Image: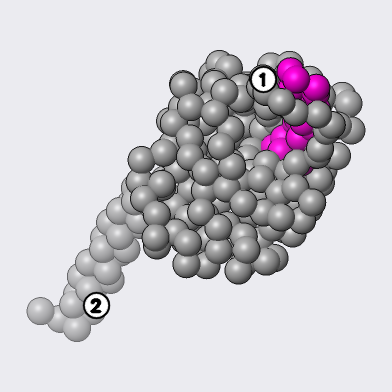
Amino acid sequence: MSYRRFVHLFLAFACINLVAFGAVAQKKKPETMQAQGTKVAAPEPPLPRGDKLKEGPEQTAKATKVFGEIMGTPDKGIPADLLNKAECVAVFPSVIKAGFIVGGKAGRGVASCRTQTGWSAPAFLEIKGGSIGLQAGGSSTDVVLLFMNTEGLKKLVSNKVELGADASIAAGPVGREAAASTDASMSAEILSYSRSKGAFAGVSLKGSVVSAEKSDMEDTYGGSVTAMQVLAASNNRAPAEVQGFANKLGEYSSRKAR
């Protein structure tokens, strides 16, 4: 074989291989892009924004302040291990108890649940209840509820729930070591706490009725979003004015949903 013929054959072979390699690369390119695309999830759209963003931000600001103050005193506050076990947290600032012989209580609050990305957007709740007994005068009490599983809050936001009847509730233990000496968290769906005149303790709220607060929900998110949808949404999807409550929860417990 002559040198010139060898060179021609070598160049022809090289050209064929380059063409084949290019065809394979072109074929694989869309597949690679598609594979890469599946790794990057599209950002979720924001939740609807209501027309009257006033009451919602005020409620979340109050709840954020109350929770921060309570957790700022760990020796007398909610045990950290119980908070880490809780799936949802609700805070009702300034629940009013008043009456003479026949008494009652009412208040509005904010709740957030764990999601795959952290604490959820805030949902707005109300608590009402009545009691009969020898009582007089009135008081303002901060109430905190720890939902130890998602079933308790699902019942609550789906319909009105009577604590102790429709959802099991127990007074929550207080202090760093208190959780180790009680089995309350093992059986109750909800653990309840109250703070009145600076004193913080577990409290029984049996007979109280908790439900979604429709006015605050509508003012914040409009009329088309349910409390359950909000509690399943990431906090960054909520209006910026009401994101502070979930952010504060994250400072003390950053565990994501299981």
Residue 107 sits inside the magenta stretch: yes
Can residue 35 be seen? no
Q: Position of residue 5 (x, y in %)?
A: 19, 75
Give amino acid for label 2: Val
Alpha-carbon neighbours of circle 2 within 10 Å: few (<14), some, or many (≥20)? few
Percent across and percent down for residue 11 are 28, 71
Identify the secondary structure beneath mark 1.
strand
Query: Where residue 6 appears, x then y in whole percent?
Result: 18, 77
Predominant secondary structure, magenta span: strand
The answer to whether 180 appears left or right of 86 in the picture is left
- Tell me the crowding category of disc 1: few under 14, some 14 to 19, or many 20 or more residues within 10 angstroms, Cα based: few
**Which amino acid is tagged 1?**
Ile
- Residue of label 1: 132
In the image, 239 versus 78, the foreground residue is 78
Disc 2 designates what residue? 7
Q: Which mark is residue 227?
A: none
Q: Residue 243, position in %: x, y?
A: 73, 46
Q: Is residue 186 magenta?
A: no
* Magenta stretch in the rendered image: 92-110
Element carrying mark 2 = helix
Report the residue that reaches farthest toward the left: 1
What residue appears at the point 63 percent right and 40 percent down from the top-left corner?
90
* Residue at 36% over, 50% down: 183
Question: Quadrant where the N terminus lies?
Answer: bottom left
Upstream in the sequence, badge 2 or badge 1? 2
In the rendered view, would you say 174 is above or below 233? below
User: Foreground residue, 90 or 105?
Assistant: 105
Q: Is residue 183 above or below residue 110?
A: below
Observer-nearest residue: 75 or 55?
75
